[in-house]
Image: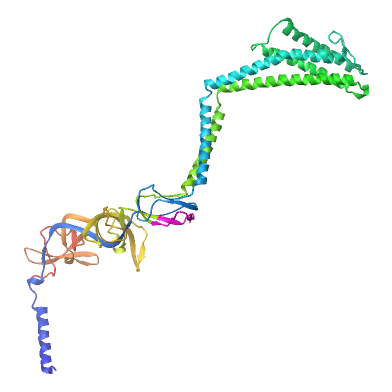
Amino acid sequence: PISKKWFIALVAVILLVVVYLAFFSKGDNSVQKITVARGDVSQDVQISGKTKAVSNVDLAFQSGGKIVAVYADVGAKVVKGTVLAVLDQAELSANKDQSSATLASEEARLRELQRGARPEELAIVESALEDAERSYISELERAYASLDGIVRGKIDELFTDGQNASPQFNPFTSDYDVEKNIEKLRIEVEAKLDMLEKRFRIGGVNITATNFESYATDIESALQSTQNLLNAIGGSVNNQKYGTNEADRATLASARASYNTLVATINAAEEKYNTAQKNLDLKQKGSSEEEIAAQLAKVDQARAGVSSIGAKMSSFVIVSPIDGVVTKQDAKVGEMAQAGIIVTSVISAGNLEIEAYIPEVNIGKVSVGNPATITLDALPGESFVGSVLYIDPAETVLDGVVNYKTKVSLESSDERIRSGLTSNLTIHSAEKKAVIVIPRYAVSTVGGASTVKKLSVDTSDVATTAITLGLQGSDGNVEVVSGLVEGDVIVVDGSVQ
């Protein structure tokens, strides 16, 4: 063991060394003189993050159904619009074909209405009108003979001297006025038959396309008078209080049947003629604005039907919305897919970004657009460039510290760089060139005021001088905005031997 005497001696030696160092070792080596000069100063923020795809999409069918095709497996490179998987669309395809045919038909009808009648179409309706006109004229020409047979051949069996000026109604009636009215109507019919006879027989005039309408009017008048006569006779002959004369009733029934057949024949011919005339008028006139508008509505409705089915079919297909690489493919041919369940994922290829978190103490230094230098643990010795793309306005608390999520671009298409790599970022937030620069350790800051100790070259005196600081560099230097000029000398300790 060390004796007490040697222990006291050792302590004494240590004390002498301490005193010497404290009081006698000061000299020129303890004072650092710094000549103020111009230089560059840059402010950097260093953080770490992870590479990730710019786009990462999860895809699902919008409708449920049976999977019939899968076109891309995991790892496959795809471009935007590539079909990845398809459900059974057989029924929808048939419906779309039918809807497309309906649309084509409605569009053709619209073009027809907008174009108007073609010459060949006009020729068809004109020919139909000519046929109807000839048929109508033929019926008018036969009408006189038929009417003559009805009145003079059948109705006159109920009269004495029916064709004379004073016909006598034979069936018994005690009503004088009824009898005289029937005889008056017979005279009226006779007059109209005489007029028609003169036109068709004595005059020898044929009905033509230019005059048949006036003849039709005369025949219509004679038919109406005949009907009035038949109705009046019917009211008398069929009245039971005058007794029953079956022969008179049979005569009346025969005359009425022949009359009805004649009227039906003429009416049918007239209707056919009028319809043909109307069709020609419509063809010549063309379609109205209302007809075209109505057809346009039908076309729009048919087109909407096709679009609706097309939209439904698109929900049966998964299509890549980006250029990239398939990272998930759970679709299997023959399986049933459920709507909204993710089966496929795609990330953008060759277009990565870095996601990192900047602490609140540094976030004020960083702005969107700042350049960045990037190194990757997976590729030591290499560096890449990028820039700040986005700073989340909302904070994210990590381990009790407020951070802000930031995205930095990676301007490289190097295939070695994959999603999920650890990245070291140096964000160059600010830089100034050729400014007054001094070391940060030479500055004293008290109560927000910054000072340095400035050496007077003439007197060797040291004075405390206030300065205004600017940009603080990441390398330990700071910019001096005012208080110093190039060539000034500052000292760190403030004493000179």
Q: Is residue 38 left or right of residue 195?
A: left
Q: Can residue 398 be seen in this view?
A: yes
Q: Does residue 308 appear anywhere in the picture?
A: no
Q: Where is residue 54 in the image (x, y as percent from the top left)?
A: 34, 54
Q: Where is residue 223 in the image (x, y as percent from the top left)?
A: 76, 16
- Tell me the magenta residue range: 328-344
On the picture, is 64 further left or further right than 391?
A: right
Residue 356 in the figure: left or right of residue 211: left
Residue 232: x and y in percent read 84, 19
Q: Is 334 contained in the magenta span? A: yes
Quadrant that contains the N terminus: bottom left
Q: Is residue 8 magenta?
A: no
In which quarter of the view is residue 221 placed? top right
Furthest-front residue in this view:
334
Q: In this view, does 10 lie above or below 100?
A: below
Q: Where is residue 391 in the image (x, y as percent from the top left)?
A: 33, 57
Tell me the residue at 7%/66% (across/down): 460
Vertical position of residue 18 compared to residue 168: above or below: below
Indicate the quadrant containing the C terminus: top left, top right, bottom left or bottom right.
Answer: bottom left
